[in-house]
Amino acid sequence: MSTEPETPLLDSGFRRRDRSVQPRLLWPEYKSTLNRAPTQPLVPLSPTLSEITGPTFSPQEIDLIDRDLLQNARIDRDPLGERTLLTGRVIDQDGTPLCATRIEIWQANAAGRYQHASDNYQAPLDPNFSGYGCCLTDELGNYEFLTIRPGPYPFANGANTWRPSHVHFSIFGPAFATRLVTQMYFEGDPLIRDCPMLGSIPDRSAQSRLVAAFDMERSRPFDCLAYRFDLVLRGPKQTHFENRPDGL
Ligand SMILES: [Fe+2]
């Protein structure tokens, strides 16, 4: 059973999120929050029918190659970069695994550039790397992706602000309304310390839940290094999900 301390119940029936461990909505060091932080009390809205009835996914929709970013966009050679294995589990607050959960990831290439029309960073694209992968968790909630380690990239925030190497994660429950999105960082990355996005999470231990641990045991000799990142849906060790509304 969860030991997460509860915040006061609001008139709306929701509980406000604990901002001592969850990101501050207004955090001037992360300039985008100046434009998007709400200035009025939040209004809870019920999900629409289409948001709670789909989409549904079947295992037949996903092939093994979809979890292999070294191969799933390969044209004539493997993508450039550090071969990297990402593994982990999706679990609830009691450690119960979530099986057959669709996980999608997207990331920059080794030079720190996304294969996306709006990314105009001067670093080169890699024609053999799309930066997208997906898989379903197994019966124990495990997932696995083979990829390259993404490079850091600059972004318009301060005079010289860089995103640490990171991988975006989306996990679907049974419907769009239950989709959760977060970012994974790499243990030991010196850019983590000064990242204004991570800095919006006031609690250091809560920040560390977004940092994948280097995992030598799973590293494959003469092949790739490994990192481990578990996604915890709720409870005192919950992962920060950037799109989860207050009260859920
Ligand atoms: Fe990113």
Image (cartoon, helix red, strand yellow):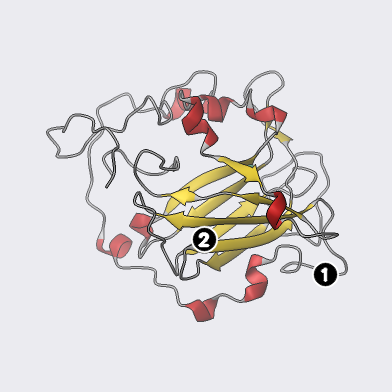
Q: CA distance from mark 2 to mark 1?
A: 24 Å
Residue type at mark 2 is Ile
Residue 94, above or below 127? above
User: What element does badge 2 sit on?
Assistant: strand
Query: Is the C terminus in the top left, top right, bottom left or bottom right quadrant?
Result: top left
Left or right of 26? Residue 88 is right
User: What element does badge 1 sit on?
Assistant: loop
At 40% from the left edge and 27% from the top edge, which residue is drawn? 25
At 32% from the left edge and 29% from the top edge, which residue is drawn? 18
Which residue does the numbered mark 2 point to in the structure image? 103
Q: Splitting the image into 4 quarters, where does residue 41 fall?
A: top left
Farthest bottom residue?
60
**Visible in this render: residue 115?**
no
At 28% from the left edge and 38% from the top edge, which residue is drawn? 3
Nearest the eye: 86 or 132: 86
Q: Position of residue 96 (x, y in %)?
A: 37, 58
Q: Splitting the image into 4 quarters, where does residue 131 fall?
A: bottom right
Q: Position of residue 180 (x, y in %)?
A: 43, 51
Residue 239, above or below 31? below
Which comes sooner in the sequence, label 2 or label 1?
Answer: 1
Residue 245, above or below 61? above
Q: Position of residue 140 (x, y in %)?
A: 47, 66
Residue type at mark 1 is Ile
Numbered label attached to residue 75: 1
